[in-house]
Image (spheres, rainbow, N blue to C red):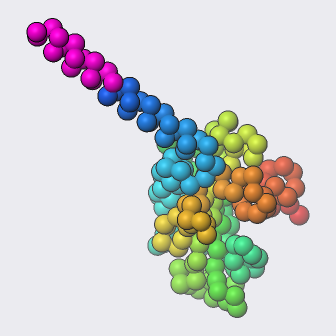
């Protein structure tokens, strides 16, 4: 009798673990199929924000670089920093673009009080080979001024391979940058 109970318990545990594994695998597959806004993208974006805070690229007391006139979709006035940061022990290139508004503000307004006029922060972070080989392995994210991730009109968090395959959005726009590097800051 005890052997039958032990076999039953072991069988039940096996089925429980197998079911959990299948659910986990399905969840991971769904996340991989989703080009942006998945749980892995959101978690990585939070780590990226923390790395930017540590490097004084965002937040109170962040480095104040020279602002310049921008354009949609980023903002009327912009500040851009091209640097390297470490995320999960891997150091790589990051482009940080602070987006200021509303229309009508001046470069001087932003220089004097950047925190007052900051509307969003957009980033590109060079991920490891194989992350998104179709798009030079860039990770994209758009944060609100307080560090929360922004959302698209459908409610998807803007982190990951943002708008991959779409006619509009981060990747579609930056594909037009010269040099096949997705960066306009290098173009003259």
Q: Which residue is drawn at the image coordinates 11% and 10% (left, top)?
A: 2
Q: Residue 104: x percent and y percent?
A: 70, 91
| Residue placed most toward the observer, 54 or 158 | 158
Total marks drawn?
A: 0
Q: In the rendering, at what x and y percent does residue 73 appear?
A: 72, 73
The relative height of residue 175 versus residue 4 in the rendered view (above or below) is: below
Residue stretch rendered in magenta on the structure: 1-15
- Residue in the image at 52% along x and 64% along y: 149
Residue 10 in the image, given as x and y percentages of width and height? 24, 17
Residue 6 among magenta residues: yes
Q: Where 70 sits versus 38, above or below?
A: below
Left or right of 116? Residue 127 is right
Q: Quadrant of residue 119?
A: bottom right
The percent position of residue 187, horizontal first and vertical second, equals: 86, 60
Question: From the viewer's perspective, is 179 left or right of 51?
Answer: right
Q: Residue at x 73, y 39 (%)?
A: 133
Q: If the image is split into quadrants, where does the N terminus sit?
A: top left
- Is 126 in the magenta? no
In the rendered image, the residue lying farthest to the left is 1
Dominant secondary structure of the residues highlighted in magenta in the image: helix
Q: Is residue 164 visible?
A: yes
Residue 49, relative to residue 104: is it above or below?
A: above
- In the shown orientation, is residue 176 left or right of residue 70? right
Q: Residue at x 38, y 30 (%)?
A: 19
């Amino acid at each position: 009798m005890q052997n039958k109970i032990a076999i039953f318990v072991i069988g039940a545990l096996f089925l429980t673990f197998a079911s959990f594994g299948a659910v986990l695998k399905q969840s991971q597959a769904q996340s991989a199929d989703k080009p942006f806004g998945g749980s892995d993208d959101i978690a990585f974006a939070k780590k990226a924000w923390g790395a930017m805070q540590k490097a004084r690229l965002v937040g109170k007391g962040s480095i104040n670089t020279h602002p310049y006139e921008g354009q949609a979709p980023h903002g009327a006035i912009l500040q851009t920093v091209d640097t390297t940061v470490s995320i999960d022990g891997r150091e790589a290139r990051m482009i940080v673009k602070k987006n200021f508004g509303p229309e009508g503000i001046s470069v001087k307004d932003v220089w004097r009080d950047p925190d007052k006029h900051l509307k969003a922060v957009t980033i590109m972070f060079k991920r490891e080979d194989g992350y998104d080989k179709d798009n030079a392995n860039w990770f994209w994210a758009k944060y609100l001024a307080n560090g929360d991730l922004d959302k698209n009109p459908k409610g998807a968090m803007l982190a990951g391979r943002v708008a991959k395959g779409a006619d509009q959005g981060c990747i579609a726009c930056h594909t037009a940058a010269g040099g096949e590097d997705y960066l306009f800051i290098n173009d003259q």
